[in-house]
Image: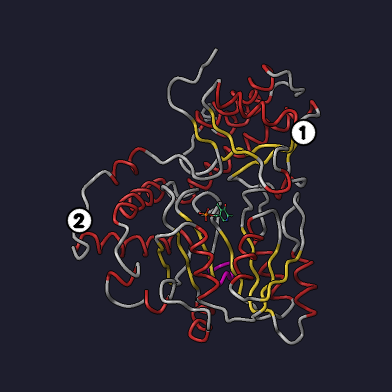
Amino acid sequence: MSLRGGREFLMIPGPTTVPDEVLGAMHRPAVDIYSGPLVEVTMSCLRDLRTVFRTAGDTYIYAANGHGAWESALTNTLSRGDRVVVLESGLFALGWAEMAKRLGIDVIILPGGWRRAADPDQLQAFLRNDREGRVKAVLLTQVDTASGALNDIPAIRRAVDEAKHGALLMVDLIASLGAIPFEMDEWGVDVAVAASQKGLMMTPGLSFVAAGPRAKQVHPKADLRTFYWDWSFRDGPEHYQKYCGTCPEHLMFGFRKALDLILSEGLDDVHQRHRLLAEATRRAVAEWAKGGAIDFNILQPDQRSDSVTVLAMDEAHATPLLDYCRDVCGVVLGIAIGPASGRGFRIGHMGHINAPTLLGTLGVIEMGLAALGIPHGSGGCSAAIAYLAEKTDRTSG
Ligand SMILES: *Cc1c(COP(=O)(O)O)cnc(C)c1O
Protein backbone atom coordinates (compact mmCIF):
# COMPACT_ATOMS: atom_id res chain seq x y z
CA MET A 1 0.00 0.00 0.00
CA SER A 2 1.33 3.43 -0.88
CA LEU A 3 0.16 6.83 0.29
CA ARG A 4 2.66 8.85 -1.67
CA GLY A 5 0.51 10.32 -4.43
CA GLY A 6 0.49 14.10 -4.38
CA ARG A 7 3.34 16.44 -3.64
CA GLU A 8 6.56 14.96 -2.33
CA PHE A 9 8.12 16.66 0.72
CA LEU A 10 11.86 17.18 0.38
CA MET A 11 12.93 17.40 4.02
CA ILE A 12 16.68 17.07 3.60
CA PRO A 13 19.09 19.75 4.82
CA GLY A 14 19.83 20.98 1.31
CA PRO A 15 19.01 21.40 -1.39
CA THR A 16 15.67 22.43 0.08
CA THR A 17 12.24 23.04 -1.39
CA VAL A 18 12.23 25.86 -3.93
CA PRO A 19 9.06 28.00 -3.74
CA ASP A 20 6.89 28.00 -6.86
CA GLU A 21 7.30 31.80 -7.10
CA VAL A 22 11.06 31.32 -7.33
CA LEU A 23 10.78 28.61 -9.97
CA GLY A 24 8.34 30.82 -11.86
CA ALA A 25 10.74 33.77 -11.80
CA MET A 26 13.31 31.66 -13.64
CA HIS A 27 10.89 30.58 -16.35
CA ARG A 28 11.62 33.28 -18.89
CA PRO A 29 13.86 33.89 -21.87
CA ALA A 30 17.43 35.02 -21.44
CA VAL A 31 17.99 38.76 -21.71
CA ASP A 32 20.78 41.00 -22.97
CA ILE A 33 23.59 40.86 -20.43
CA TYR A 34 24.13 44.60 -20.85
CA SER A 35 20.51 45.56 -20.16
CA GLY A 36 19.62 47.91 -17.36
CA PRO A 37 17.11 45.63 -15.61
CA LEU A 38 19.66 42.82 -15.28
CA VAL A 39 22.24 45.21 -13.85
CA GLU A 40 19.61 46.29 -11.34
CA VAL A 41 19.00 42.64 -10.36
CA THR A 42 22.71 42.22 -9.68
CA MET A 43 23.15 45.44 -7.76
CA SER A 44 20.00 44.94 -5.69
CA CYS A 45 21.00 41.37 -4.77
CA LEU A 46 24.50 42.52 -3.73
CA ARG A 47 22.83 45.20 -1.61
CA ASP A 48 20.20 42.91 -0.09
CA LEU A 49 22.85 40.33 0.73
CA ARG A 50 24.35 42.96 3.03
CA THR A 51 20.99 43.11 4.78
CA VAL A 52 20.84 39.33 5.12
CA PHE A 53 24.46 38.96 6.31
CA ARG A 54 23.87 42.02 8.52
CA THR A 55 26.99 43.78 7.35
CA ALA A 56 28.17 47.04 5.87
CA GLY A 57 31.00 45.08 4.23
CA ASP A 58 31.32 44.00 0.61
CA THR A 59 29.33 41.13 -0.84
CA TYR A 60 30.17 38.83 -3.76
CA ILE A 61 28.08 36.44 -5.82
CA TYR A 62 29.59 33.37 -7.50
CA ALA A 63 28.07 31.02 -10.06
CA ALA A 64 29.22 28.13 -7.89
CA ASN A 65 28.07 25.91 -5.06
CA GLY A 66 29.20 26.42 -1.47
CA HIS A 67 32.63 24.96 -2.18
CA GLY A 68 33.24 27.90 -4.49
CA ALA A 69 32.51 30.37 -1.68
CA TRP A 70 34.92 28.41 0.55
CA GLU A 71 37.64 28.80 -2.08
CA SER A 72 36.90 32.49 -2.47
CA ALA A 73 37.22 33.10 1.28
CA LEU A 74 40.56 31.30 1.47
CA THR A 75 42.24 32.53 -1.71
CA ASN A 76 41.29 36.17 -1.22
CA THR A 77 42.80 36.46 2.24
CA LEU A 78 45.63 33.93 2.63
CA SER A 79 49.03 33.04 1.23
CA ARG A 80 50.76 29.71 0.69
CA GLY A 81 52.14 28.45 4.00
CA ASP A 82 49.87 30.59 6.17
CA ARG A 83 48.48 28.75 9.16
CA VAL A 84 44.76 28.48 9.91
CA VAL A 85 42.87 26.79 12.73
CA VAL A 86 39.73 24.85 11.90
CA LEU A 87 37.20 24.04 14.61
CA GLU A 88 35.63 20.64 14.14
CA SER A 89 31.98 20.24 15.10
CA GLY A 90 30.97 17.54 12.67
CA LEU A 91 31.92 17.17 9.04
CA PHE A 92 31.72 20.36 7.07
CA ALA A 93 34.53 22.40 8.62
CA LEU A 94 36.77 19.43 7.85
CA GLY A 95 35.86 19.73 4.17
CA TRP A 96 36.88 23.38 4.24
CA ALA A 97 40.10 22.33 5.99
CA GLU A 98 40.82 19.77 3.27
CA MET A 99 40.40 22.44 0.62
CA ALA A 100 42.77 24.75 2.51
CA LYS A 101 45.39 21.98 2.67
CA ARG A 102 45.16 21.45 -1.08
CA LEU A 103 45.78 25.16 -1.57
CA GLY A 104 49.02 24.89 0.40
CA ILE A 105 47.73 26.36 3.63
CA ASP A 106 49.06 24.96 6.91
CA VAL A 107 45.92 23.63 8.60
CA ILE A 108 45.55 22.78 12.26
CA ILE A 109 42.31 21.08 13.26
CA LEU A 110 41.04 21.45 16.79
CA PRO A 111 39.10 18.22 17.28
CA GLY A 112 35.64 18.67 18.72
CA GLY A 113 33.98 15.36 18.03
CA TRP A 114 30.71 14.51 16.47
CA ARG A 115 28.14 15.27 19.14
CA ARG A 116 28.96 18.75 20.38
CA ALA A 117 29.54 22.31 19.25
CA ALA A 118 33.01 23.83 18.95
CA ASP A 119 34.53 24.79 22.30
CA PRO A 120 35.53 28.48 22.69
CA ASP A 121 37.82 27.72 25.66
CA GLN A 122 39.77 25.18 23.65
CA LEU A 123 40.27 27.80 20.93
CA GLN A 124 41.29 30.47 23.41
CA ALA A 125 43.90 28.21 25.00
CA PHE A 126 45.26 27.32 21.57
CA LEU A 127 45.51 30.93 20.44
CA ARG A 128 47.19 32.00 23.68
CA ASN A 129 49.98 29.57 22.88
CA ASP A 130 50.45 31.06 19.43
CA ARG A 131 52.73 33.81 20.74
CA GLU A 132 54.27 34.59 17.35
CA GLY A 133 50.83 35.11 15.81
CA ARG A 134 51.37 32.43 13.18
CA VAL A 135 47.65 31.66 12.93
CA LYS A 136 46.11 33.89 10.27
CA ALA A 137 42.51 32.72 10.43
CA VAL A 138 40.00 30.72 12.47
CA LEU A 139 37.49 28.74 10.39
CA LEU A 140 34.24 27.16 11.51
CA THR A 141 30.61 26.63 10.53
CA GLN A 142 27.69 28.29 12.27
CA VAL A 143 25.72 25.07 11.80
CA ASP A 144 27.26 21.73 10.93
CA THR A 145 24.76 20.07 8.63
CA ALA A 146 26.05 16.57 9.31
CA SER A 147 26.07 16.61 13.12
CA GLY A 148 23.32 19.20 13.66
CA ALA A 149 25.57 21.31 15.90
CA LEU A 150 24.99 25.04 16.33
CA ASN A 151 28.19 26.92 17.09
CA ASP A 152 28.12 30.01 19.29
CA ILE A 153 29.82 32.55 17.03
CA PRO A 154 29.89 35.47 19.53
CA ALA A 155 31.55 33.15 22.08
CA ILE A 156 34.15 32.14 19.48
CA ARG A 157 34.80 35.83 18.75
CA ARG A 158 35.27 36.50 22.48
CA ALA A 159 37.73 33.63 22.66
CA VAL A 160 39.84 35.20 19.90
CA ASP A 161 39.65 38.63 21.54
CA GLU A 162 40.45 37.37 25.02
CA ALA A 163 43.50 35.58 23.64
CA LYS A 164 44.45 39.02 22.20
CA HIS A 165 44.92 37.33 18.85
CA GLY A 166 44.65 39.01 15.45
CA ALA A 167 43.44 36.03 13.39
CA LEU A 168 40.59 36.61 10.97
CA LEU A 169 37.32 34.90 11.87
CA MET A 170 35.73 33.10 8.90
CA VAL A 171 32.32 31.50 9.25
CA ASP A 172 30.47 29.09 6.96
CA LEU A 173 26.75 29.95 7.05
CA ILE A 174 25.75 27.62 4.25
CA ALA A 175 23.29 25.74 6.47
CA SER A 176 22.13 28.71 8.51
CA LEU A 177 21.86 31.99 6.57
CA GLY A 178 18.20 32.81 6.10
CA ALA A 179 17.23 30.41 8.89
CA ILE A 180 19.11 31.40 12.04
CA PRO A 181 20.11 34.86 13.31
CA PHE A 182 23.57 35.97 12.27
CA GLU A 183 25.12 39.39 12.87
CA MET A 184 28.28 39.69 10.83
CA ASP A 185 29.34 43.16 11.98
CA GLU A 186 28.05 43.05 15.53
CA TRP A 187 29.70 39.68 16.13
CA GLY A 188 33.00 40.71 14.56
CA VAL A 189 33.05 38.15 11.77
CA ASP A 190 35.60 39.01 9.06
CA VAL A 191 34.49 36.68 6.26
CA ALA A 192 31.14 34.90 5.92
CA VAL A 193 30.18 32.39 3.23
CA ALA A 194 26.77 31.10 2.20
CA ALA A 195 25.06 29.27 -0.64
CA SER A 196 21.69 29.55 -2.35
CA GLN A 197 20.17 26.11 -1.85
CA LYS A 198 19.43 25.81 1.86
CA GLY A 199 17.92 28.57 4.01
CA LEU A 200 17.84 30.95 1.05
CA MET A 201 15.27 28.84 -0.84
CA MET A 202 16.97 28.92 -4.25
CA THR A 203 18.20 26.10 -6.44
CA PRO A 204 21.85 25.07 -6.07
CA GLY A 205 24.24 27.07 -8.21
CA LEU A 206 24.96 30.36 -6.46
CA SER A 207 27.17 31.11 -3.51
CA PHE A 208 27.92 34.26 -1.60
CA VAL A 209 30.76 35.81 0.34
CA ALA A 210 30.73 38.84 2.62
CA ALA A 211 34.04 40.46 3.48
CA GLY A 212 34.58 42.89 6.34
CA PRO A 213 37.24 45.63 6.55
CA ARG A 214 39.94 43.49 8.18
CA ALA A 215 39.61 40.89 5.43
CA LYS A 216 39.74 43.57 2.75
CA GLN A 217 42.83 45.00 4.42
CA VAL A 218 44.86 41.78 4.16
CA HIS A 219 43.42 40.92 0.73
CA PRO A 220 45.96 42.86 -1.44
CA LYS A 221 48.82 40.76 -0.03
CA ALA A 222 47.13 37.35 -0.32
CA ASP A 223 49.24 35.32 -2.76
CA LEU A 224 46.59 32.62 -3.28
CA ARG A 225 44.44 35.07 -5.25
CA THR A 226 43.31 33.82 -8.64
CA PHE A 227 41.49 35.67 -11.39
CA TYR A 228 38.09 34.01 -11.09
CA TRP A 229 37.56 34.38 -7.36
CA ASP A 230 39.38 37.69 -6.95
CA TRP A 231 37.49 40.31 -4.94
CA SER A 232 39.47 43.22 -6.45
CA PHE A 233 38.44 42.31 -9.97
CA ARG A 234 34.83 41.90 -8.90
CA ASP A 235 34.91 45.28 -7.15
CA GLY A 236 35.40 46.84 -10.59
CA PRO A 237 32.70 48.98 -12.20
CA GLU A 238 31.56 46.76 -15.11
CA HIS A 239 28.61 44.42 -14.76
CA TYR A 240 30.50 41.38 -16.16
CA GLN A 241 33.14 41.85 -13.48
CA LYS A 242 30.58 41.03 -10.77
CA TYR A 243 30.51 37.46 -12.12
CA CYS A 244 33.89 37.36 -13.88
CA GLY A 245 31.97 36.57 -17.07
CA THR A 246 28.37 36.03 -18.13
CA CYS A 247 25.78 36.68 -15.44
CA PRO A 248 24.01 33.40 -14.48
CA GLU A 249 20.80 35.19 -15.41
CA HIS A 250 18.17 32.66 -14.50
CA LEU A 251 19.77 31.86 -11.19
CA MET A 252 19.78 35.57 -10.46
CA PHE A 253 16.11 35.98 -11.43
CA GLY A 254 15.28 33.16 -9.04
CA PHE A 255 17.51 34.46 -6.29
CA ARG A 256 16.01 37.96 -6.62
CA LYS A 257 12.57 36.44 -6.01
CA ALA A 258 13.82 34.36 -3.08
CA LEU A 259 15.26 37.48 -1.46
CA ASP A 260 11.97 39.29 -2.07
CA LEU A 261 10.11 36.51 -0.24
CA ILE A 262 12.54 36.57 2.70
CA LEU A 263 12.60 40.35 3.02
CA SER A 264 8.84 40.72 2.68
CA GLU A 265 8.27 38.16 5.43
CA GLY A 266 10.95 39.99 7.44
CA LEU A 267 14.23 38.44 8.60
CA ASP A 268 13.18 38.39 12.24
CA ASP A 269 9.92 36.62 11.40
CA VAL A 270 11.77 34.16 9.18
CA HIS A 271 14.10 33.34 12.08
CA GLN A 272 11.20 33.03 14.51
CA ARG A 273 9.37 30.65 12.15
CA HIS A 274 12.47 28.46 12.01
CA ARG A 275 12.89 28.60 15.78
CA LEU A 276 9.32 27.47 16.45
CA LEU A 277 9.30 24.70 13.86
CA ALA A 278 12.69 23.44 15.06
CA GLU A 279 11.54 23.41 18.66
CA ALA A 280 8.37 21.55 17.65
CA THR A 281 10.61 18.96 15.99
CA ARG A 282 12.66 18.62 19.16
CA ARG A 283 9.50 18.24 21.28
CA ALA A 284 8.46 15.30 19.10
CA VAL A 285 11.90 13.71 19.14
CA ALA A 286 12.13 14.04 22.93
CA GLU A 287 8.96 11.92 23.25
CA TRP A 288 10.09 9.33 20.69
CA ALA A 289 13.45 9.09 22.45
CA LYS A 290 11.75 7.68 25.54
CA GLY A 291 11.50 4.34 23.70
CA GLY A 292 15.29 4.02 23.73
CA ALA A 293 15.86 3.44 20.00
CA ILE A 294 16.21 7.02 18.88
CA ASP A 295 18.12 10.00 20.27
CA PHE A 296 19.41 13.48 19.45
CA ASN A 297 22.87 13.37 17.94
CA ILE A 298 23.83 16.63 19.68
CA LEU A 299 23.98 15.95 23.39
CA GLN A 300 23.49 19.43 24.81
CA PRO A 301 20.06 20.99 24.07
CA ASP A 302 21.40 24.54 23.60
CA GLN A 303 23.79 23.30 20.89
CA ARG A 304 21.04 21.93 18.62
CA SER A 305 20.51 23.85 15.40
CA ASP A 306 17.22 25.41 14.32
CA SER A 307 17.87 24.50 10.68
CA VAL A 308 18.48 20.76 10.87
CA THR A 309 17.86 18.10 13.51
CA VAL A 310 20.14 15.08 13.45
CA LEU A 311 18.95 11.87 15.07
CA ALA A 312 21.03 8.95 16.21
CA MET A 313 19.55 5.49 15.74
CA ASP A 314 20.92 2.02 15.34
CA GLU A 315 21.67 0.67 11.89
CA ALA A 316 18.86 -1.87 11.85
CA HIS A 317 16.20 0.84 12.20
CA ALA A 318 17.42 3.90 10.33
CA THR A 319 17.37 2.67 6.73
CA PRO A 320 13.96 0.93 6.90
CA LEU A 321 12.47 4.07 8.47
CA LEU A 322 13.82 6.35 5.72
CA ASP A 323 12.64 3.88 3.06
CA TYR A 324 9.18 3.79 4.61
CA CYS A 325 8.87 7.57 4.80
CA ARG A 326 9.95 7.99 1.18
CA ASP A 327 8.35 5.00 -0.52
CA VAL A 328 5.09 4.76 1.39
CA CYS A 329 4.49 8.40 2.27
CA GLY A 330 6.51 10.59 -0.12
CA VAL A 331 8.57 12.27 2.60
CA VAL A 332 12.27 12.40 1.79
CA LEU A 333 14.48 12.65 4.88
CA GLY A 334 18.24 13.14 4.95
CA ILE A 335 20.51 10.16 5.39
CA ALA A 336 23.10 10.31 8.15
CA ILE A 337 26.55 11.14 6.77
CA GLY A 338 30.10 11.08 8.08
CA PRO A 339 31.04 8.86 11.03
CA ALA A 340 27.32 8.27 11.78
CA SER A 341 26.63 7.06 8.25
CA GLY A 342 23.75 4.56 8.35
CA ARG A 343 23.15 5.18 12.04
CA GLY A 344 20.50 7.84 12.10
CA PHE A 345 18.87 10.41 9.87
CA ARG A 346 18.45 14.13 9.43
CA ILE A 347 15.34 16.29 9.28
CA GLY A 348 15.98 19.45 7.30
CA HIS A 349 13.71 22.23 8.53
CA MET A 350 15.01 25.30 6.78
CA GLY A 351 13.91 27.58 4.01
CA HIS A 352 10.46 27.17 2.51
CA ILE A 353 8.84 25.31 5.41
CA ASN A 354 5.72 25.91 7.40
CA ALA A 355 3.57 24.22 10.03
CA PRO A 356 1.86 21.75 7.67
CA THR A 357 5.09 20.57 6.02
CA LEU A 358 6.76 20.16 9.38
CA LEU A 359 3.81 18.52 11.13
CA GLY A 360 3.20 16.31 8.11
CA THR A 361 6.80 15.18 8.25
CA LEU A 362 6.70 14.48 11.97
CA GLY A 363 3.42 12.62 11.49
CA VAL A 364 4.94 10.42 8.82
CA ILE A 365 8.00 9.65 10.96
CA GLU A 366 5.77 8.70 13.87
CA MET A 367 3.69 6.53 11.53
CA GLY A 368 6.85 4.84 10.30
CA LEU A 369 8.08 4.17 13.83
CA ALA A 370 4.74 2.47 14.55
CA ALA A 371 4.44 0.61 11.23
CA LEU A 372 7.96 -0.80 11.56
CA GLY A 373 7.64 -1.68 15.24
CA ILE A 374 10.56 0.57 16.23
CA PRO A 375 10.45 1.23 19.98
CA HIS A 376 9.47 4.84 20.62
CA GLY A 377 7.68 6.92 23.20
CA SER A 378 4.16 7.83 22.12
CA GLY A 379 2.81 11.34 21.72
CA GLY A 380 5.66 12.94 19.77
CA CYS A 381 3.35 14.67 17.31
CA SER A 382 0.95 15.69 20.07
CA ALA A 383 3.83 17.35 21.90
CA ALA A 384 4.86 19.21 18.74
CA ILE A 385 1.29 20.35 18.11
CA ALA A 386 0.76 21.41 21.72
CA TYR A 387 3.94 23.47 21.59
CA LEU A 388 3.00 25.24 18.35
CA ALA A 389 -0.56 25.82 19.57
CA GLU A 390 0.76 27.46 22.71
CA LYS A 391 3.12 29.66 20.70
CA THR A 392 0.35 30.78 18.38
CA ASP A 393 -2.35 31.03 21.04
CA ARG A 394 -5.03 33.50 19.93
CA THR A 395 -7.48 33.04 22.78
CA SER A 396 -5.82 35.73 24.87
CA GLY A 397 -6.62 38.26 22.15
C1 LIG B 1 25.89 22.04 2.21
C2 LIG B 1 27.04 22.60 2.98
C3 LIG B 1 28.29 22.84 2.39
C4 LIG B 1 28.60 22.46 0.99
O1 LIG B 1 27.88 23.22 0.09
P1 LIG B 1 27.93 22.83 -1.46
O2 LIG B 1 26.96 23.76 -2.09
O3 LIG B 1 27.53 21.40 -1.55
O4 LIG B 1 29.33 23.04 -1.93
C5 LIG B 1 29.26 23.41 3.17
N1 LIG B 1 29.06 23.73 4.45
C6 LIG B 1 27.87 23.51 5.06
C7 LIG B 1 27.69 23.90 6.48
C8 LIG B 1 26.84 22.93 4.34
O5 LIG B 1 25.67 22.69 4.93
Which of the numbered marks, if any, corresponds to residue 314? 1
Q: Rounded to the nearest whole Å, what is the CA distance between mark 2 and mark 1?
A: 52 Å
What residue sits 41% from the left and 41% below the top? 18
> Does the magenta run of residues contain 132?
no
What residue sits 34% from the left and 44% below the top? 22
Give above or below for 246 relative to 148.
below
Q: Secondary structure at mark 2?
A: loop
Task: Using residue 200 as the reference point, say whether residue 244 is left or right of it.
Answer: left
Q: Nearer the viewer, residue 380 or 253?
A: 253
Q: Which colour scheme appears in the figure?
A: secondary structure
Give above or below for 154 relative to 190.
above
The quarter of the picture where residue 59 lies is bottom left
Label 2 CB less than 8 angstroms from ligand 1: no
- In the rendered image, the quadrant that contains the N terminus is top right
Stretch in magenta = 185-190
Q: Report the residue marked by disc 2.
A: 31
Q: Position of residue 387 (x, y in %)?
A: 62, 31
